[in-house]
Image (spheres, rainbow, N blue to C red):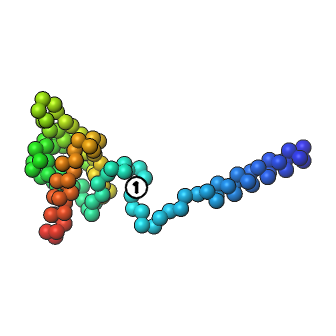
Amino acid sequence: MKKILSITLISAIALVLSTGCSSKNVNASETHDPKVSAEALYVNTHDNEKIAKAIKKAGEKTGWIITEFKSNEVIAEKLDGKNTISSSIMFSDGHIEFENASATSDLRDAIEDELNKTAAAH
């Protein structure tokens, strides 16, 4: 019984030590939320109204139809010949996430330009 107890104790200590030594180093300069996709566009504002306006203006300039869906999400649609491209765009806490990032690259660039213009004006 003592032998089983000591083996269990040694195993538990080894497990605790190996877990503690293998923990991830956190980089202080890393500001990306791990819950947000790697393709998210990080912006210098947390004002959702300002972000929504920039998305609408960018959509108008690039031929996307922007439809409000939720207070922090819109649907973007664009006709490409006979096909319709669509994507939901969610924005909050200083980032914008695109459901269909590869199809909305022109819109993403236009949104970034629009937000940069807004920031430069203030």
> From what the image shows, is residue 83 above or below residue 25?
above
Q: Name the residue at 22% across, 44% down.
A: 104
Q: Position of residue 36 (x, y in %)?
A: 37, 50
Which quadrant does the C terminus fall into? bottom left
Looking at the rendered structure, the kind of residue marked 1 is Asp
Q: Name the residue at 40% across, 55% down.
A: 33
Most foreground residue, 55 or 92: 55
Q: Which residue is mark 1?
A: 33
Q: Name the residue at 13% across, 68% down.
A: 121
Residue 40 appears in the figure: yes
Q: Name the residue at 19% across, 36% down.
A: 85
Q: Does residue 35 appear left or right of residue 82 in this picture? A: right
**For the residue labelled by badge 1, is the local secondary structure a helix, a strand or a loop?**
loop
Residue most extreme to the right: 2
The number of numbered badges drawn on the structure is 1
The image quarter in which residue 118 lies? bottom left
Q: Position of residue 97 (x, y in %)?
A: 30, 48
Residue most extreme to the top: 82
Q: Position of residue 44 (x, y in %)?
A: 27, 63
Residue 52 appears in the figure: no
Mark 1 packing: few (<14 Cα in 10 Å), some, or many (20+)?
few
Q: Does residue 78 appear left or right of residue 89 in this picture? A: left
Q: Does residue 30 appear left or right of residue 53 in this picture? A: right
Q: Does residue 4 appear left or right of residue 20 in this picture? A: right
Which quadrant does the N terminus fall into? top right
